[in-house]
Amino acid sequence: DFPIYLLDSLGQLDGAGRVVGGKPSLVLGIDRMMIENPTLRPVLLAHEFFHRYHAQAGGFSDDPGEGQPIWRVLWAEGLATYVSMKLTPGATLTDALILPVDLETQAKPKLADIVARLKPKLDKVDPATYRLLFTYGGKDAAKAGLPWRSGYYAGYLVAAELGKTRTLTGLAHMRGQILRKAIEAALTKIAA
C-alpha cells in the first residue's frame, strides 16, 4: 500500500524510503542497483520492502532519517538488516550489511566504542550522531576512526539479540517503551 518509484538517481541511491507528495514511498535507483554487486539486489530489495512493512506494522521508518530519535533509527535500520538476511536465501551478514563490504570486520573490534556513542544519544534527535553512524561516505566516521554505517551493524546485533526469543513478525510489531528498554539492554549486552 505505497507507491514505488524506479528512477535514474544519477548515482545517488540504490534504494530508500522517501516521502513523495506527502505519501511514504519506496524509491529505487535502478542505475545504482545495476552498478553495485548484482548478487546484493535480493537482499537490498528485502531491506527496502521491509522498511515499508515496518512503517505500517510497527510505526518505524527510515523516512525521517536524522529527524528522529537515535533509538528509532537504530531499530529501523538494524531490524531491516536482520530481516533482509533472514528472508534472502543464502544471504550472509556481509550481504545484508551491503556497504562497505567489510563493515562487520571493521566494526566488530570497535563495537564498545560504537555502543558508547549510541547509548547517551538514544532518546535524542541528533543529526551529528546520525551522520557519524548511519550514513555512507561521510568524513565524520573516518575522523572518528569508525567505519561508515557502523550503526547498521550495531542495530543488526540488537535485532539478532532480541530475535533469539521472538519471531520476525513479533520483532516487526514491537514498539514503545518496552522496545526502547529492550534495545538499551541489548546494546549493553553486545558491548560486553
Image (cartoon, helix red, strand yellow):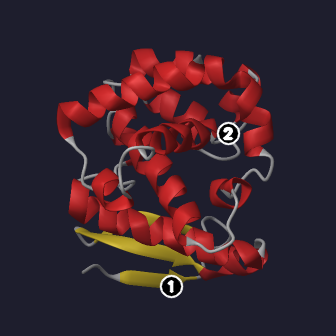
Residue 58: x and y in percent read: 23, 55
Residue 190: x and y in percent read: 56, 26
Judging from the image, what secondary structure is the residue with disc 2 in? loop
Q: Which mark is residue 6?
A: 1
Is residue 125 in sight in this rendering? no
C-alpha distance separating marks 1 and 2: 26 Å
- Taking the spot 63% from the left edge, 18% from the top edge, the residue there is 112
Q: Residue furthest front?
A: 165
- The answer to which quarter of the image holds residue 86 is bottom right
- Taking the spot 60% from the left edge, 66% from the top edge, the residue there is 13
Residue type marked 1: Leu
> Which quadrant is home to the C terminus?
top right
The image shows residue 59, relative to residue 132, as above or below, that is below
Which residue is the site of mark 2? Answer: 138
Number of numbered discs overlaid on the protein picture: 2
Residue 127: x and y in percent read: 45, 32
The image shows residue 99, relative to residue 137, as above or below, that is below
Q: Which mark is residue 161?
A: none
Is residue 168 in sight in this rendering? yes
Q: How many residues crowd mark 1 within 10 Å: few (<14), some (14–19), many (20+)?
A: some
The image shows residue 42, relative to residue 19, as above or below, that is below
Judging from the image, what secondary structure is the residue with disc 1 in? strand
Residue type marked 2: Gly
The image shows residue 106, relative to residue 117, as above or below, that is below
- The answer to which quarter of the image holds residue 120 is top left
